[in-house]
Image (cartoon, rainbow, N blue to C red):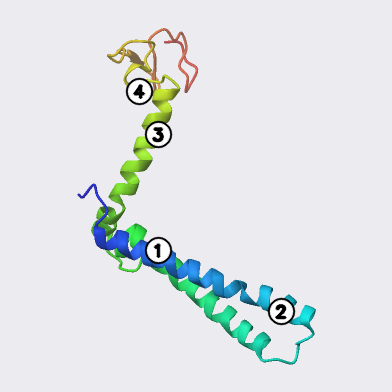
Amino acid sequence: MTRKISDERKGAYGIGLVLQIIGGCLFGIPFIVGPLSVMSGNIDSGAIPAAFIAAFIGFGLIVAGGFIRNVAAKGSAGSGLVLDPEKAREDLEPWSRMGGGMVKDALDEADINLNNLGGGHSVPQQVIMIKCRECGKLNEEDSKFCQECGKPM
């Protein structure tokens, strides 16, 4: 398993981000051209239809950039583009490791040690169970009656 994201995936992620930024700028053109055309009284010009065409192209770039970023971030199998569970695990391994690291950091910050959850003992305590003669249910060693059938132990 790899712990790093490849340079190709990082580059594709950057390309997707640039496409989304350009798309956002194109998508915003009608919100600038429309009011300016109305304020200048130049509504009959071809600027407004061209601005809406730019908005549709911009929306397409936003969607395409988002798709490219998703595939670049999660890999082809991790994003579901290729159905291969082993490859998906490999593609998503850096993100899984990051998530586990974040949980570990949170536990460390809360001063919770998973090795010492047994009352401060690093070795788990041995639990003795007693089997009921009537029904076979395992009960704690200090039980006077069976937790399943209620018969005396």
Viewer-side label of 4, 2:
2
Q: Is residue 41 left or right of residue 119?
A: right
Q: Residue at x 25, y 54 (%)?
A: 90
Mark 1 surroundings: few (<14), some (14-19) or many (≥20) residues within 10 A? many
Residue picked out by circle 4: 114
Q: Are marks 4 and 1 in contact (CB under 8 Å)?
A: no
Between the C-alphas of marks 4 and 1, the distance is: 36 Å
Between the C-alphas of marks 3 and 1, the distance is: 25 Å
The amino acid beneath tag 3 is Val
Q: Is residue 124 left or right of residue 67?
A: left
Viewer-side label of 3, 2:
2
Helix, strand or loop for disc 3 = helix
> Which circle marks residue 69 in the picture?
1
Viewer-side label of 3, 4:
3
Q: Are marks 1 and 2 in contact (CB under 8 Å)?
A: no
Viewer-side label of 3, 1:
1
The amino acid beneath tag 4 is Leu
Mark 4 surroundings: few (<14), some (14-19) or many (≥20) residues within 10 A? few
Marks 4 and 1, the one that precedes in the sequence: 1
Between the C-alphas of marks 1 and 2, the distance is: 31 Å
Q: Position of residue 27 (x, y in %)?
A: 58, 74
Marks 3 and 2, the one that precedes in the sequence: 2
Between the C-alphas of marks 3 and 2, the distance is: 49 Å
Helix, strand or loop for disc 2 = helix
